[in-house]
Amino acid sequence: MFKKYDAYLVGYYGMRNSGDDALLYATAWAAKNILGCNNTKVGLYGDYTRETQSDNQFPLKFTQQFPGQNRLLHYKTAIQSKRIIFGGGSVLHSENDINLKRQLMSLANQKKSLAVGVSIGPFNSVTAEQSCAKFLNECGYVGVRDNISLEIAQSIAPQANVHKTFDLAPLLLYSNQYKPKTNKRKGIALTLCSVAIDAMGKTDNVEEEKRCKQFAQLITKLYEQTGEPITLIEFNGHNVLGDWKINNNIVVRLDKNIPVSIKKYDPNPIALLNNLSGYKAILSMRLHGSILGYLANTPVLSINYHSKCKGWCSEVGMPEDYQIDLFNLNIEKIVSQITLGISTNFQQPTLPVDNALKNSLSNWSIQNEQFKFYRSYSII
């Protein structure tokens, strides 16, 4: 059967989330420049205009005109594609979603399909774990970005072609649009988010209010100690679940004399990366806030609310003093570390950015007889 597309790129793309935007850009870039896929297609939810290497973008529906509309759109594109590429993110945890991915591979080509820079679990049911085991055994190649995911994969699908790789985001550094700021750094950025307590994004309102008060206190003390302007960056621009909610709740609690601004969600991950290169420090709850800050060579303190945040800190060797437990927030310690870093020098992660880039490329340097058409890519 004639296949119209070299690959169909599948992920949580188009949902106005900067982390997913970065993963899409990196996946599309690698598909084109490393795998040689000159004709790819990507499905995007909602506002589907994105800066990618893929010329074929089509809209998936937040509000479907009939049940299963998006599924049919997925099926149609999968049938037309030589392989499926699942590019990055926490994409293997829900039974229905995993089963859809299995169906897409079966309509394209299972053994030529691959999942790269992904994490596995936590599963929302026993049947989700069973479905994931089937996915791992069926997918031609799986690169997981963290050791916990590798351990899960080896436990539930020991014969599957799964390897430890890295997050995809460092591939953004290959963009010719990346132009880090060369003028003097200024200000402190925070990338904050609400903490969901269920799959529907519901939050504990009492705890959220408590955290907003804490962050308002933290920002106040940061400004008093450093004199640096504060920027709250929206990594999620969703009109219901976005970061605007927590940011607005914090701003209304601040004294009018504190110079704080909100930077709205930017759908271009390269522009965001450029912006992050101009701050003196970043305090980040968002995983890809920490990752992009690291790539921009900006000192990052990670506020860990999820295992994926701790996993990233471990991957790059983030200093222990810069790993903050959200549920045991020590405001004085955070202010002290940032003040000390600005006045002297910040501690550095033990993994150089160049090494992170090599690790990210390992997603695509596949040593397997089923993937002879893949070629390695050298550091530029």
Image (cartoon, helix red, strand yellow):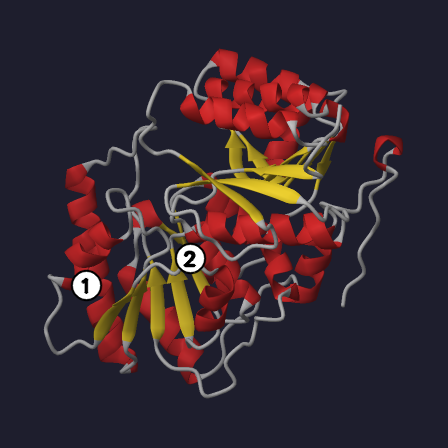
Quarter of the image where the C terminus is located: bottom right
Residue 288: x, y in percent? 47, 54
Relative to 309, is 303 on the left or the right?
left
Question: What's the distance in space between the residues labelled 2 and 1, CA to CA?
Answer: 30 Å
Q: Residue at x 29, y 48 (%)?
A: 242
Quarter of image, res 76: top right
Q: Quadrant of the N terminus?
A: top right
Q: Which residue in the protein does label 1 denote?
A: 217
Q: Of 132 and 14, which appears nearest the observer?
A: 14
Name the residue: 71% across, 61% down.
355
Q: Is residue 74 visible?
A: yes
Taking 153 as reference, is 212 left or right? left
Find residue 69 and report its horizontal and vertical position in percent.
42, 23
Secondary structure at badge 2 equals loop
Query: SS of the residue at dot 1?
Result: helix
Which residue in the structure is indicated by mark 2?
267
Q: In this orientation, which residue lies closer to the viewer: 285 or 85? A: 85
Amino acid type of disc 1?
Answer: Gln
Task: Name the N-terminal-most of marks 2 and 1.
Answer: 1
**Figure disc tally:** 2
